[in-house]
Amino acid sequence: MPVPSERLAGWLAPKWIVGAVALAAFTLLVNFDLRLGLAAGALFGVIAVIWLYVAVRFGSLSGVPSIRTSIVESAQVHSRNRRSAEARTGLAAQQRPDPAERP
């Protein structure tokens, strides 16, 4: 069954962890060599602008609901319906007999 990504990410989204690591790498490079740090900063900036464009145009910042979220909600509704049907009828799902327990 699909699991919402919020539970997987915990309290901190992976994009913020990646951003923090990039900022730490940039700081280390600037302290080592200013020109190398500025080149890395420019590269990180270009990557950030491309990510922002894609996120606004197609992704989570566009305001369009996620397809994955609708699939997770559908699976949860299906599971609730199955449990309520089992509770109403009093029957659990039938399991196949174990061939090792044959007489």
Image: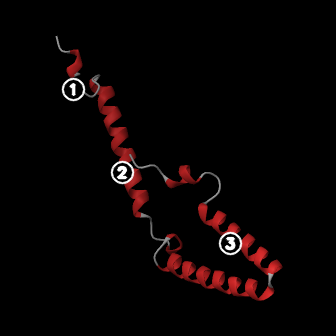
In this picture, is 95 found above or below 78? above
In this picture, is 17 found above or below 82? below
Residue at left offset 39%, top offset 57%: 70
SS for callout 3: helix
Residue at left offset 70%, top offset 83%: 41
Q: Where is residue 61 in the image (x, y as percent from the top left)?
A: 54, 73
- Which label sits on residue 22? 3
Q: What residue type is labelled 2?
A: Ser
Rounded to the nearest whole Å, what is the CA distance between mark 3 and mark 1? 53 Å
What residue is shown with label 2?
74
Q: Where is residue 99 in the image (x, y as percent from the top left)?
A: 20, 21
What residue is shown with label 1?
96
Of the numbered discs 3 and 1, the one sitting upstream in the chain is 3
Image position of 35 (left or right of 84): right
Q: Where is residue 83 in the image (x, y as percent from the top left)?
A: 35, 33
Residue at left offset 29%, top offset 25%: 92
